[in-house]
């Protein structure tokens, strides 16, 4: 019987689909039309042989993926195996099973490696945690974190650098503080403790640790400044709303302070807002990046919404709600804080290039800063009956306990929206109708 030729294979058409071609020596091919290739065909070659008294059939390969010569050579190789007492079909099956076993083994090896890496990551040392913090967050500091690194190398790493971050306790932190205080470096101790708190807060946010070992240590007990607790009374808020329009602050700064008070956000978050994150229709303001690294969504009450609407008339065509003069980014986050401080300097002589209205924002309770408005709004929420957990969510504080973060994640959207609305309604009364307001009593 004549053998198949390459020329004959090249002349095949899709209409030959299913046609059987013999190549002699018990090898034959079946023509297959190729889908999605109207003019193309392939030919699958198989070979019959006798082994152990049985007729068996094995697939050789397909043309044109393999040349006709390569297909015949493969058949001849299988013939040689039969002479050596090897069944080609069983050999192919054994080879397939081996490849499958190799793949499973490789996959298992990869899984084991990933598990080992995960375990290693979970047991990250303090030094390793610091390096991760430096690569992600610390590098954003003006000095790139070099000062913090120098301090940690001198006072932290020698004591707990090789300790797993998850194993660090309050006693470890206290030992670092005591060692430094014994050297009389009070200011440096403050800075190192502050960086330790930020480091372990970073670790909490990424679930490297379950509890913050710095949480129960009060900064003022190690010689630091007493934490600010300035909260404006409702009488001061009424005065604040009266003074703000005549304080000499530009309108955008007045809006920024009002937004901060009505949303209890940070002044830097307000000044860094982008228009793409303000949804007027749904009354939502999204903060994609916050101090704790998590996204925060604020439900805008009427007071906050009015400020954004007023700002849109002036800066709505720019990227930023509070753009810098060159429109290449947001205004400096310290701008409003300096403007507020300038207007509380009292009888000081006016400074060159600074506001001459040195007491236009002075209030009865003493000096205040923009961040005090955030604390004031949160306090006012509490006085209006908002639950502490809801206020914490509105403030976007990170839950300190991992169990609560993971297993007790209640949906706070509705109570948070109601909390912001209560705050906005109360502020509106203080701003617009102070004469009919009975101020809330506040414990001393």
Image (cartoon, helix red, strand yellow):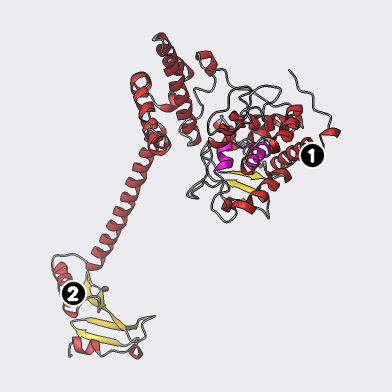
Give the vertical position of 70 relative to 290 (above or below): below
Task: From the viewer's perspective, tell me whether residue 203 is left or right of residue 85.
Answer: right
Q: Can the viewer see residue 53 in this picture? A: yes
Residue under circle 1?
432
Location of the N terminus by quadrant is bottom left
Location of the C terminus by quadrant is top right
Please state the extent of the stretch shown in magenta in the rendering: 254-272
Judged from this view, the residue extending furthest toward the right is 436
Nearest the eye: 344 or 357: 357
Which of the 4 quarters of the picture holds residue 218? top right
Q: Is residue 308 magenta?
A: no
Task: From the viewer's perspective, tell me whether residue 442 is left or right of residue 313.
Answer: right
Q: Percent x, y for residue 13?
A: 31, 89
Q: Residues within 10 Å of mark 1 (few under 14, many from 20)?
A: few
Give the vertical position of 396 relative to 225 (above or below): below
Mark positioned earlier in the residue sequence (1 or 2):
2
Q: Can the viewer see residue 398 in this picture? A: no
The span from disc 1 to disc 2 (Cα, nearest Å) is: 95 Å
Give the vertical position of 428 relative to 198 (above or below): below
- Circle on res. 75: 2
Nearest the eye: 42 or 388: 388
State the predominant SS element of the stretch in magenta: helix
Query: The residue tagged with tag 1: helix, strand or loop?
Result: helix
Give the vertical position of 281 relative to 422 (above or below): below
Nearest the eye: 116 or 97: 116
């Amino acid at each position: 019987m004549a053998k198949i030729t390459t020329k004959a294979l090249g002349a095949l058409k899709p209409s030959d689909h299913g046609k059987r071609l013999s190549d002699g020596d018990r090898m034959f091919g079946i023509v297959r039309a190729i889908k999605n290739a109207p003019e193309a065909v392939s030919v699958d070659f198989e070979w019959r042989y006798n082994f152990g008294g049985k007729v068996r059939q094995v697939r050789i390969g397909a043309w044109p993926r393999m040349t006709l010569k390569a297909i015949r050579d493969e058949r001849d190789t299988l013939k040689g195996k039969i002479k050596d007492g090897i069944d080609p079909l069983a050999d192919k099956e054994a080879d397939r099973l081996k490849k499958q076993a190799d793949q499973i083994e490789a996959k298992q090896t990869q899984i084991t490696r990933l598990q080992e890496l995960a375990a290693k990551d979970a047991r990250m040392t303090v030094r390793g945690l610091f390096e991760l913090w430096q690569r992600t967050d610390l590098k954003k500091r003006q000095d790139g974190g070099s000062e913090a690194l120098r301090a940690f190398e001198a006072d932290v790493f020698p004591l707990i650098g090789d300790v797993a971050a998850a194993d660090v306790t309050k006693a470890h932190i206290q030992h670092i503080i005591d060692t430094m205080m014994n050297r009389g470096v009070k200011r440096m101790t403050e800075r190192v403790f502050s960086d330790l708190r930020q480091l372990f807060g970073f670790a909490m946010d990424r679930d490297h640790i379950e509890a913050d070992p710095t949480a129960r240590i009060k900064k003022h007990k190690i010689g630091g400044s007493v934490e600010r607790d300035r909260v404006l009374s409702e009488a001061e808020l009424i005065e604040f709303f009266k003074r703000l329009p005549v304080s000499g602050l530009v309108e955008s700064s007045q809006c920024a302070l009002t937004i901060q008070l009505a949303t209890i956000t940070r002044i830097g978050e307000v000044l860094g807002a982008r228009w793409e994150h303000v949804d007027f229709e749904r009354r939502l303001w999204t903060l994609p990046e916050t101090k704790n690294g998590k996204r925060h969504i604020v439900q805008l009450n009427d007071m906050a919404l009015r400020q954004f609407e007023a700002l849109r008339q002036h800066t709505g065509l720019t990227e930023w709600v509070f753009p810098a003069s060159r429109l290449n980014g947001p205004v400096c986050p310290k701008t409003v804080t300096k403007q507020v401080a300038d207007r509380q300097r009292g009888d000081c002589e006016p400074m060159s290039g600074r506001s001459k209205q040195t007491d236009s924002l002075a209030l009865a309770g003493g000096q205040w800063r923009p961040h005090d408005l955030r604390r004031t709004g949160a306090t006012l929420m509490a006085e209006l009956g908002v639950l502490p957990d809801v206020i914490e969510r509105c403030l976007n504080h990170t839950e300190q306990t991992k169990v609560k973060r993971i297993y007790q994640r209640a949906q706070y959207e509705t109570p948070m929206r109601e909390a912001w609305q209560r705050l906005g309604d109360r502020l509106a009364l203080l701003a617009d109708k102070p004469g009919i307001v009975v101020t809330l009593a506040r414990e001393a």
